Amino acid sequence: MQEADWLRRDESTATTRSIGQVVREYRLAAGANQGTVAEALGLTQQFLSQIEKGSRKATLEHRRGFARVLGIPPEEVGLAHPARGQVFTDADPSVAASRGRWRAQRHWLNSHRSELARMAIRYYDVDYRLPRTSLISGEGWVPAAPIELDSIRLHLDERPRTIEVTGAERQTRPVRPLRLRDIPFETYSTAVRHLDPPRLFESRPSYRYLGGTISDGSMNFGLAAYFDKLDVSEALAHETAAACLAHAAASTVHLPSSLPFRELIGDPFDAARRAIIPAITTLTIRLRRFPESPTFLLHWRDPDRVATAAGLYDVIPAGEFQPSGIALWDRRNDFSLWRNIVREYSEELLGHPEHDGTRSTPIDYANWPLFQNLGAARDRGTMSVHLLGFGLDALTLAATLLTVVVIDNDAFDDMFGAAVRYNDEGEIVGIGDGRGTDGVPFTREAVTRMLDTEPMAAPGAACLALAWQHRHSLIG
């Protein structure tokens, strides 16, 4: 496969920080004053101050020097891909330094999630690892073969339940920057909201996994909030990134030995100890007309728009397993893997607004044209939906139900012919000059390249690996 025929996405919409803002942020994160950094670079303090303020331009040599002296990733100073985000400033030096360090670590995390995930999986016993991915899986979580989606029985218990590990423990203090002098942000999500908010960032009711396995054909769920998940998962990821930066000179070759919050978690599969709140990730395989190979849809998750799995490729659609709104009736009405998948198709492929809980009535699935048409395609056999497994991302311990939809080319055109290129979470990625909905070839070469060399979200990689393993039963 030629490079010209490989992945293409639009980077023109990315926002950028000035070189001076980046330099100031990393200098504060390192606890260095302007004089020390200027001396190391052979500059005057006044000159460095002018660069940080934006009144002087940084040359190519200056940028290389900043990257070398301050340990700034090349893309952050314009030597590779553009950086994203905005800088938060504060008059108190200790608060500014804490926040600058946190932002620098989070930016580095979002630039290295794929490598960090591949490293983090070494933390767990080989028997738990899902081959070719950075996902771990409990006993009975991945069936020997894909199962029909409707064959899994789901049970919902709405009674209140405690959460032992919330992400507010003292072990997370190093990844919660200062809100005020000597007072850290209470949770990781609060820090994100104030210092690095993506476009989509709200805590919604979500279904909490309580037990059961796919192999047994039954899974139990309760209720929790989305930020219950994020306060733990993103704190775990940030802890790993910060430890790598501190102990291995920004290297991800070896997992740092000191990860107190990960140690506190203990058994990652213990659903009583923390809120395991799964997402649903769906690989969409489009059966093209012979002799063309089947293709699969691919999504780029824009760090400016999402709080998790940012800066990675993923399969599409993907979304949290949660009610469509906050009303009590939505909890039962939306408690279905298939209904959640259809809502994500509506939002991510067709660009329809996300169901946000503002309705006074539950969604009328039976009379929703998209839901009707997809159901009819399943009944006709022009579309199939299977559950591949259930796993945890080794880096974040975030859970995902892994599914696959195989759809006939004509049925795809009928329902998704008007698919958008951009959605609220990123971009549907094309190959070469093709459209995103044309998909990526579902071939050994392309699958291997995605799994081995591209920065891919762990759940999407797992869907792809499992679907390829079972390709003969899925697509005949």
Image (cartoon, rainbow, N blue to C red):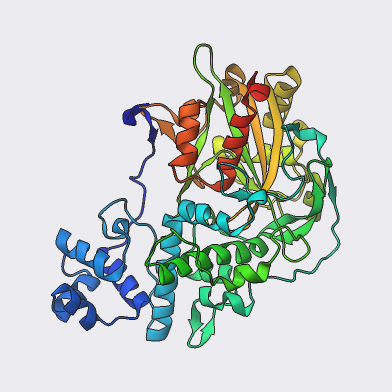
Q: Position of residue 89 (x, y in %)?
A: 38, 76
Using the image, determine if residue 73 lies above or below residue 458: below
Choose between 393 and 86: the one closer to the eye: 393
Residue, far front: 126
In the image, 103: left or right of 160? left
Residue 92 visible in the snapshot: no
Q: Position of residue 127 (x, y in %)?
A: 67, 49
Q: Position of residue 176 (x, y in %)?
A: 53, 75
Measuring 79% from the left and 69% from the top, which residue is drawn there?
Answer: 162
Q: Quadrant of the N terminus?
A: top left
Measuring 72% from the left and 65% from the top, which residue is drawn there?
Answer: 274
Choose between 225 and 34: the one closer to the eye: 34
Q: Position of residue 32 (x, y in %)?
A: 30, 81
Using the image, determine if residue 455 lies above or below residue 397: above
- Give the mark count: 0
Residue, far top: 290
Residue 165 visible in the snapshot: yes
Q: Quadrant of the C terminus?
A: top right
Using the image, determine if residue 246 lies above or below residue 315: below
Using the image, determine if residue 317 lies above or below residue 59: above
In the image, 471: left or right of 273? left
In the image, 174: left or right of 252? right
